[in-house]
Amino acid sequence: MSFKASRVLVASRNFANDATFEIKVRSGLRLEEGPPVTTVLTREDGLKYYRMMQTVHRMELKADQLYKQKIIRGFCHLCDGQEACCVGLEAGINPTDHLITAYRAHGFTFTRGLSVREILAELTGRKGGCAKGKGGSMHMYAKNFYGGNGIVGAQVLALACKYNGKDEVCLTLYGDGAANQGQIFEAYNMAALWKLPCIFICENNRYGMGTSVERAAASTDYYKRGDFIPGLRVDGMDILCVREATRFAAAYCRSGKGPILMELQTYRYHGHSMSDPGVSYRTREEIQEVRSKSDPIMLLKDRMVNNNLASVEELKEIDVEVRKEIEDAAQFATADPEPPLEELGYHIYSSDPPFEVRGANQWIKFKSVS
Amino acid sequence: MAAVSGLVRRPLQQVSGLLKRRFHRTAPAALQVTVRDAINQGMDEELERDEKVFLLGEEVAQYDGAYKVSRGLWKKYGDKRIIDTPISEMGFAGIAVGAAMAGLRPICEFMTFNFSMQAIDQVINSAAKTYYMSGGLQPVPIVFRGPNGASAGVAAQHSQCFAAWYGHCPGLKVVSPWSSEDAKGLIKSAIRDNNPVVVLENELMYGVPFEFPAEAQSKDFLIPIGKAKIERQGTHITVVSHSRPVGHCLEAATVLSKEGIECEVINMRTIRPMDIETIEASVVKTNHLITVEGGWPQFGVGAEICARIMEGPAFNFLDAPAVRVTGADVPMPYAKILEDNSVPQVKDIIFAIKKTLNI
């Protein structure tokens, strides 16, 4: 069979336009009704989510490789295993909504609109990086994406959302470790008091660095920790679950009812960071089990193939394209030059006239431009 | 590590009399100890000596410490003495200060001092000021320790030096070890001190081995808080530093020595209370002064040294203005070329020395 003929064959194969899936929110608090129990996934959306999750996954693996080659330095916290969280959240909100998270942020940087090129080049500290090489892994920003923060806690943008009155919501993310920071409870109180349109999202991947949730939290029901704030516990490995819950939460906030809390139960394959092998506090069997039974990309793929939304070959083609995109981005990220030394002092203040910045001694001066 | 030093200790004690006389010669079995192991040893010995001493912080117990400084301690002392905390700095610092007020002797670890900002109210208001506010009734025998300052590629939020911030506060003692000997002697003194002591370690120094003199191997080896050490004698210029930059100063001194310039390098060891007398005596001798630190220039350690020199007898002996070498006045950038130029390098120290000496 000639190549041309086989392409025609694929094109003429009938895929379903969409399929309906059952989704189950695991638990809820203070909500009379929860998200719907079924959802429709269109072929188009399915392919889009698959591509996005595969891109995040491969991008993280590439970062792992570059770190081991010492081309990426410092801290590097990878989110492979948690792809359904960033892609699912993005699928449930608008680009005009706001999102802020902690340092495990490469996936969100991508889903919020930056290219793999800009992200990898930031990781390698080059001038083509999204923060011009000055921020690194933990400090990436994009439109309506406020990082990438190294010190965990809850910076909430919801006050601005309510103030501006444009029907926007704010997603404030933190992990199971940071869930024990006092400032989150202060934010809960004010968000509820002032009915701010804030979705608090706890990405519970079971371990805060090397400490399991049982050893860190008196209550591991993170979705209940908002107390007077309604909460949802959701399977963070199932992208459709994440999407539906997010849609529900966003609608709740937009209706002016105040904040809501979502706990995404998820898992990271890598250790806490590239300096942590990740096996001193959990077993390899546990990691393997999650990979084989709950991998988010595998779950989506199986659903699409079994419901005739896509073929295995088609998804493999997407894999090949994604791999190429990542390779190209990595090439760029390794070849791009470092930021120029003259710009060391730039961007200290915003909207200010230029001034002089002192270097290592009084004779070394840098110019600072906003 | 304790096992190795135990093996070496016994024969050395037998010849200790001999060694004391031949203090400046290398010991027969020159023991190399990393800064990490020195801190570990110091804490281990104090935990053993006084059961009121305990360690708490993130990942200090079962993970062996984020930087492995507390390796083996949980296995040896158990849950009661080595406590893993949740990620709640303000909370656990408060719990530690309270424990100190009630008579225990906590060692409160901040995974880096950047995270101590989450708890700074407890350090300053609850720990530092209490003995004063209570009219001498309530001491707070607590140690806050952890890595401080720049590391490698960890960017703005993880690279700040807090020497000036904590050194500013009356009621606190602040120490900044450089070598393994410093690290062990100062942590032990800090733990035995009845006041709140901030111990500013350095992540890049943890893995660096130093020769460990015989007396440092003793379980009662202490380095007094508030006393600087002259690491290298010299006649042309006084170079004062603390923590990792001390090593850079010694490197600069070696380079300049070939050109006939002899630098006197002083390792401050303590930020507060500052040993200004040692610095003054040196300036009286050399007539020139530079200070070297990793932190930002404004209101920094060097700024304080310069001010005090002006206020004291050494000012009249200066042949040139004192000069500071510091970190660049920017949040720490990530890209390597920018980061390298944001911390004091050996070349910057040499440049400053030559400028001061008008060479």
Image (cartoon, coloured by chain):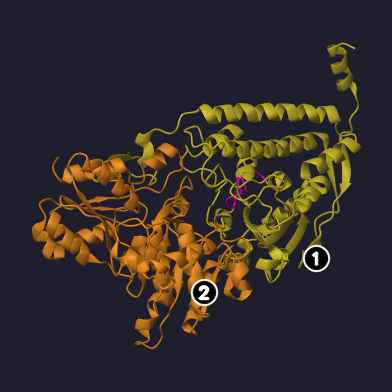
Q: Amino acid at mark 2?
A: Leu
Question: x%, y% of residue A128?
Answer: 50, 32
**Left or right: where does residue A291 sit relative to residue A14?**
left
Q: The C terminus of chain B is located in which quarter?
A: top left
The residue at 82%/28% (across/down) is: A314
Identify the chain drawn in orange: B
Which colour is chain A painted?
yellow
Q: Residues within 10 Å of mark 1 (few under 14, many from 20)?
A: few
Q: Which residues are magenta?
A: A94-105
From the image, state whether disc 2 or disc 1 is nearer to you.
Answer: 2
Q: Which residue is mark 1?
A: A32
Element type at mark 1: loop
Residue A189 appears in the picture as rendered: no
Query: Magenta region's main secondary structure?
Result: loop
Q: Which residue is mark 2?
A: B47
Q: Secondary structure at mark 2?
A: helix
Q: Pointer 1 indicates a residue of which chain?
A: A
Q: CA distance from mark 2 to mark 1?
A: 54 Å
Residue at image point 36% right, 72% down: B172
Q: Is residue A92 left or right of residue A370?
A: right
Camera-nearest residue between B186 and A87: B186
x then y, percent, for residue B27: 37, 58
Residue B51 magenta: no
Amino acid type at mark 1: Glu
Determine crowd level at label 2: few under 14, some 14-19, many 20+ residues with C-alpha closer than 10 A: many
